[in-house]
Image (cartoon, rainbow, N blue to C red):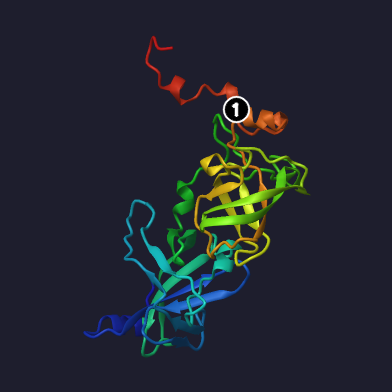
């Protein structure tokens, strides 16, 4: 590990004036620079040149690294709010996926002379970002060894492994399995009721269970443009009473319009009901299932 003479001299001193800074490279090419110091940090030249804004809205947990190539346990958390001067994270950017696997570099420097030297302490990527109704968010930091612990390629399983209903591997036309939706009553940010408009945009006839595990994309209101996963489409046996897996970032209002797309549980029987057996990407009935695999001798 190479350390500059200036950094080595400061680290050997009895009194150290260190702060932590971070750089996140979003997918749109823009950069988020932040510091945990109580004042902005300005680096005038070099690889990390720029202004690192101080913020109480974004912070990190303690980090623990091991020599066995296991994943580091660093977590980044903060607040999503337009009222704050700076957070670096916005709902729109998260929904657009600009932070998915975004490269993240963390380094230390002297807060009283940050341009003198910088020492990288961690490199990695941002993991899945989770957020709640209070506009707080958190995400895990994935180290460079994280890809080594991921499954590469397809696995032998009973269910279809398409990433999304109607994608290039599924080959179904999503528009044909979508319907217009108008909100008529609201219980919470993830529980609301509405009516379907048959033939807009698709020709599908809404039915109980058809939109379970599907998607709803808002076309108007504060949540316009946001897409959410549907948990159930008939809460309380009422068709059009949607329950989402997570809260919407903003309040759902009566009159909000949306497009609702059918869901799929990736089973052979479901794919057959859609008439899409030839594009089924699992092994279906050819896979014995976990119950038969683990059964004891003499079992049925």
Question: Does residue 97 show up?
Answer: no
Residue reaching furthest to the top: 298
**Residue in the picture at 77% in, 46% down:** 202
Residue 77 or residue 157, whichever sits in front: 77
Residue 126 or residue 124, whichever sits in front: 126
Per the image, the residue denoted by label 1 is 283
| Left or right placement of residue 168 versus residue 212 in this view | right
Residue 162, compared with residue 271, is above or below; it is: below
Residue 133 or residue 87, whichever sits in front: 133
Q: Residue 125's x, y, as percent?
A: 49, 62
| Left or right placement of residue 57 versus residue 232 in this view | left
Q: Residue 51's x, y, as percent?
A: 49, 85
The local secondary structure at tag 1 comes to: loop
Residue 52, compared with residue 158, is above or below; it is: below
Which part of the image, by quadrant, shows the N terminus? bottom left
Which part of the image, by quadrant, shows the C terminus? top left
| Left or right placement of residue 297 versus residue 169 in this view | left
Question: Does residue 50 show up?
Answer: yes
Residue 56, compared with residue 246, is above or below; it is: below
């Amino acid at each position: 590990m190479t350390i500059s003479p200036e950094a080595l001299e400061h680290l050997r001193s009895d009194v150290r004036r260190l702060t932590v800074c971070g750089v996140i490279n979003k997918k749109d090419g823009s950069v988020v620079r932040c510091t945990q110091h109580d004042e902005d940090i300005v680096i005038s030249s070099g690889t990390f040149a720029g202004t690192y804004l101080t913020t109480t809205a974004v912070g990190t947990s303690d980090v623990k690294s091991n020599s066995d190539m296991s994943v580091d346990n660093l977590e980044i958390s903060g607040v999503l709010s337009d009222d704050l001067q700076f957070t670096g994270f916005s709902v729109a950017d998260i929904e657009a996926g600009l932070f998915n696997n975004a490269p993240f570099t963390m380094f230390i420097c002297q807060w009283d002379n940050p341009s003198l030297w910088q020492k990288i302490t961690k490199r990695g990527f941002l993991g899945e970002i989770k957020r709640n109704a209070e506009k707080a968010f958190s995400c895990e930091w994935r180290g460079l060894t994280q890809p080594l612990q991921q499954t590469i390629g397809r696995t032998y399983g009973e269910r279809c492994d398409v990433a999304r209903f109607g994608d290039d591997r599924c080959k179904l036309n999503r528009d044909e399995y979508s319907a217009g939706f108008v909100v008529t009553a609201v219980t919470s940010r993830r529980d609301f009721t509405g009516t379907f408009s048959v033939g807009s945009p698709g020709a599908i006839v809404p039915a109980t269970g058809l939109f379970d595990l599907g998607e709803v994309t808002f076309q108007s209101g504060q949540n316009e443009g946001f897409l959410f996963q549907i948990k159930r489409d008939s809460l309380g046996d009422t068709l059009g009473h949607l329950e989402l897996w997570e809260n919407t970032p903003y309040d759902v209002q009566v009159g909000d319009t949306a497009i609702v797309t059918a869901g799929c549980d990736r089973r052979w029987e479901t794919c057959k009901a859609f008439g899409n057996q030839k594009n089924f990407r699992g092994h279906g009935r050819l896979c014995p299932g976990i119950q038969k695999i683990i059964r004891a001798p003499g079992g049925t």
